[in-house]
Image (cartoon, rainbow, N blue to C red):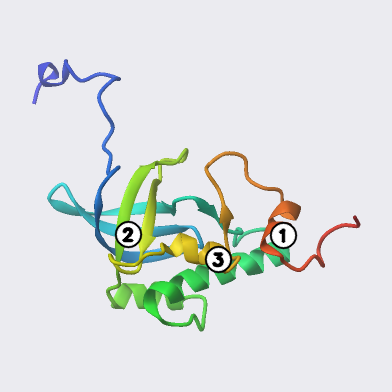
Amino acid sequence: MSKEDFRQYGGSTPELSVNGVKTYGRLVDIYDGDTVKVVLNAFGSYYKFTIRLNGIDTCEIKSKDKVLQENGIKARDRLFEIITDKKVIAKNDIKNILDTEVYLVWVECCAKDKYGRVLANIYKNKDDVKSVSEILLEEKLAYKYEGKTKLSDDDIKDYLELELATRGSP
């Protein structure tokens, strides 16, 4: 390969994208209620993608606010349960189960988010009417999010109807 082979490819060369791809993938990790890792068969081989669930946000597992942190764990565990039909007993259950058992999910890829993660609608099965995002929204474990400014901790609690014990005085 020479410099000449690359001469026509500069800064305007399109980035690799899976936008518009609809396929089954293997769920290999769940970071939190809105971020997962999925192995997809793309471009003739298998690749692991970090996927952000499209259209939602969940509480952060590493939040300093105990109520939000607990809700983040609930969202992650519920996402695991929706896909595997199993309850999380211990913290490392998710990784251990996903390492040893194969769980396929239907993935409808969208554009990348501002951090370079693939945005996607994920379904337990191809024929499901509701995505896992819609289920988490209905169960008040997530709120709508389109990638702009995140809600404040108090606004998240209001929206998700969480306990207000850690909130300051009104």
Task: Check disc 1 and give the amino acid type.
Answer: Lys
Q: Which mark is residue 157?
A: 1
Q: Which mark is residue 12?
A: none
Where 92 sits versus 108, above or below?
Answer: below
Distance between the alpha carbons at the discs numbered 2 and 1: 30 Å
Determine whether, in the image, residue 157 is placed left or right of residue 109: right
Q: Mark 1 falls on what kind of element? A: helix
Where 91 sits versus 41, above or below?
Answer: below
Determine whether, in the image, residue 80 is placed left or right of residue 164: left
- Depth check: give the residue in front, 15 or 105: 105
Give the image location of residue 164, x and y in percent.
80, 65
Determine whether, in the image, residue 74 is placed left or right of residue 27: right
Q: Which residue matches tag 2?
A: 38
Q: Mark 2 falls on what kind of element? A: strand
Where 75 sits versus 1, above or below?
Answer: below
Within 10 Å of disc 1 (Cα), the crowding (few <14, some 14-19, many 20+) is some
Task: Tell me what residue is drawn at x 62 percent, y 40 percent.
Answer: 149
Give the image location of residue 139, x and y in percent.
57, 69
Task: Tell me what residue is drawn at x 67 percent, y 62 percent.
Answer: 160
CB under 8 Å between discs 3 and 2: no
Sooner in the amino-acid sequence: mark 3 or mark 1: 3
Sooner in the amino-acid sequence: mark 2 or mark 1: 2
Q: Which residue matches tag 3?
A: 138
Give the image location of residue 158, x and y in percent.
73, 58
